Amino acid sequence: MKTNETISVEAEPYDFEFVPATCALLIIDMQRDFLESGGFGEMLGNDISQLRRTIEPNRVLLAAWRAKGWPVLHTREGHRPDLGCLPPAKKIRGRSLTTIGDKGPMGRILVRGEAGHDIIPELYPAFGEAVIDKPGKGAFWATDLHAIMQNRGIKQLIVTGVTTEVCVNTTVREANDRGYDCLVPEDCVGSYFPEFHDMGLKMIKAQGGIFGWVSHSKHVLSAIK
Ligand code: TIU
């Protein structure tokens, strides 16, 4: 398969077409604090199994994408150790006794360089794969993702990761407004709340693909094999 060949993936609301050289796999926030037992997500009372089911399909898709030598990007949600990029509103939201920046079960919560902030070992970035540290929910705001995509000629994104209605949806919307196409494989994204996951996906593909396309990793894998 040539990297300038157009590949068609079964998707909703209609097939998604992409050219490998200009389409990146963007894996959102597969961080220990969101996915692992004892992390920040679980500390807040969330059911991490809803997110952990995404690990294996992401691992398989990442391995396939890497085997082709196609572009891979990763993001992490978190803040500078001095918390200079943490808005006070985000710090106090939720009225929890322990909030972002405080000592949590895996180091300071969502602080860059801490164990819980890092990406889970199953999907650890390889050499040459950009890791984008983002202070917000969207991967474009206050990051160099847009510049990286422009510099590398990336026009389309396969967006996976967590959580469906928060960081994945926000990123897909930001990408849409910047003129990029996004495909979301539904088994590779997850939410602590199944009903938000379902609606988050419907919101993307409604109205003729108002924000993008929704598919399943099996359709991506069969299209690229
Ligand atoms: N990455 C991401 O979605 N961050 C969140 O805070 N998600 C929640 O669902 N809370």
Image (tube, rainbow, N blue to C red):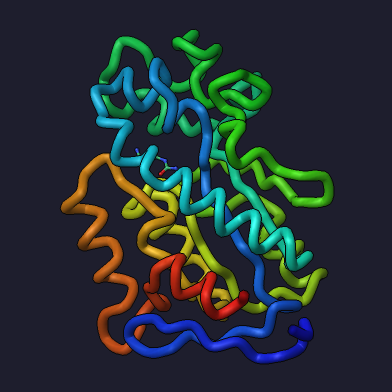
Report the residue at 57% width, 27% height from top: 117
Residue 128 location, x and y as percent? Answer: 83, 51
Quadrant in which the N terminus appears: bottom right
Q: Is residue 162 above or below residue 188?
A: above
User: Which residue is located at x 38 percent, y 32 percent?
Assistant: 89
Please give left or right for residue 90 compared with residue 142 in the image.
left
Residue farthest left in this picture: 195
Residue at 21% across / 53% down in the picture? 196
Tally of numbered discs: 0
Q: Is residue 69 above or below residue 153?
A: above
| Left or right for 215, reference 8 | left
Left or right, 160 with reference to 67: left
Q: Nearer the viewer, residue 64 or 48?
A: 64
Nearer to the camera, 224 or 14: 224
Q: Position of residue 184 (x, y in %)?
A: 43, 67
Residue 208 shows in the view:
yes
Tell me what residue is drawn at x 36 percent, y 62 percent.
186
**Quadrant of residue 4 within the rendered picture:** bottom right
Give the image quadrant in which the ligand numbered 1 is located.
Answer: top left
State whether residue 85 appears in this view: no
Q: Is residue 56 above or below residue 45?
A: below
Residue 162, x across and y down, in percent: 42, 46
Which quarter of the figure is the C terminus placed in?
Answer: bottom right
**Of the pair 111 and 54, the residue shown nearer to us:** 54
Can you tell which quarter of the image residue 6 is in?
A: bottom right
Residue 175: x and y, percent? 53, 69
